Image: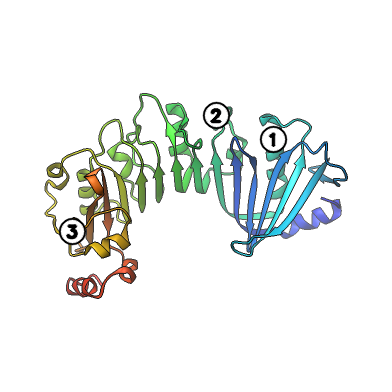
Amino acid sequence: MRSDKFLQRMKGCKFDIDHFHWIVTSNRIGIDLQIGGTRIYFSYRNLDNEIGNPVRKLNGKYLFFKLHEKTSKSDGNRCIQWEFDLRTESVENRMEMLKETTKYLKEFLTIKHYNLRFDLKELKIQDLFIWEHTKKFNNLDISEGRRSLELSPEDLKFILEELKAEIRSLKIGVNDFEYEKPIQGKYLNIENMKWITTKCLMGPDLVKMYGVGTSKNAINLNEIIKNWLNGGSLHLRSISCVYEGSLEDLFEGLNATESMFSAQDITKLSDNFLDNGRDIRRTTDRHLAIIMFSKGKRSVQFLTWHPDYVKDMRPETCQKLRNIHMI
């Protein structure tokens, strides 16, 4: 930002970074970068009352900035914060600066993962400039603090079908609409289940899902478990959500038996679940899964066996697992 010649050399080098994170929220509009053990933060505000701020050039335009640098007490990482000057701090001006900063940084960065956090209801999500750069994310977080971000069915479909993401954290409200397809992604955190249907939780890549609240039509966990038993959702590790049906409906046709896992084992596997679990096994490969209930049986967790769990098992439980050739 000091020398045009040096900038041209930078463009020819290309630096690898782990994470490029857009923040588009009511609290902050900016960019976070993770480069090895260094975090760099960009944000925008009016610096009129602060004397002595230096001038730099961004995409051929001169602007004032303020720079802060410190070491994180929690992990010892270096943290650098850039604040660029804005005459007026409107959403439009900050978004324009976000667009310019993105354009500038991408000229000399090779980015491994993109992340996005969004909650600004003043902006139409389908019109964001970000989609010109990528529609594939590692982490996609769309929520509005304690409340659900109200979107149209078309916006929801855009988020679920046009945008790809490994991790989706969604707190979205949609009036009089239910989504009837599997949600793409490995990790789902859904904090408003009103628009969720049973089909949403049967994606082929799903690993873990955590849901808060109830859906408009109760989720059929029996159907989800049978899908796993029949070879669907092969990567599934855990589904945890509110269950509104009867135990008879939940266990219909599952051939479930009293769990071999003790209360101590289950507590280490998952918080807030009792020791009244039930085990089921997939006939094709004899893979083991556990169905557990929370206090009051309001929530159910379906947990499939993984070798990582061994470290939390009692010796007696490990022996039982050896007896059925799970370890």
Q: Which residue is labeled 3 in the image? A: 279
Q: Which is nearer the eye, 35 or 104?
A: 35
Percent from the top left, x then y, of residue 235? 33, 56
Q: Which residue is labeled 1 in the image? A: 94
Q: Mark 3 or 1 closer to N-term?
A: 1
As drawn, 27 above or below 264: above
Where on the picture, by quarter, is residue 152? top left
Residues at marks 3 and 1, CA–CA distance in whole angstroms: 53 Å
Q: What residue type is labelled 2?
A: Lys
Residue at x 32%, y 34% (from the top left corner): 180
Q: Which is nearer the eye, 177 or 283?
A: 177
Residue at the right extreme?
Answer: 52
Where on the picture, by quarter, is residue 30? top right
Q: Which amino acid does label 1 sit on?
A: Arg
Q: Which amino acid does label 3 sit on?
A: Asp
Q: Mark 2 or 1 closer to N-term?
A: 1
The answer to whether residue 224 is seen in the rendering is no
Q: Which residue is labeled 2 in the image? A: 121
What secondary structure is found at the residue carrying circle 1? Answer: helix
Percent from the top left, x then y, of residue 209? 36, 48
Residue at x 31%, y 34% (from the top left corner): 215
Residues at marks 3 and 2, CA–CA distance in whole angstroms: 45 Å
Residue at x 47%, y 47% (from the top left corner): 165
Residues at marks 2 and 1, CA–CA distance in whole angstroms: 15 Å
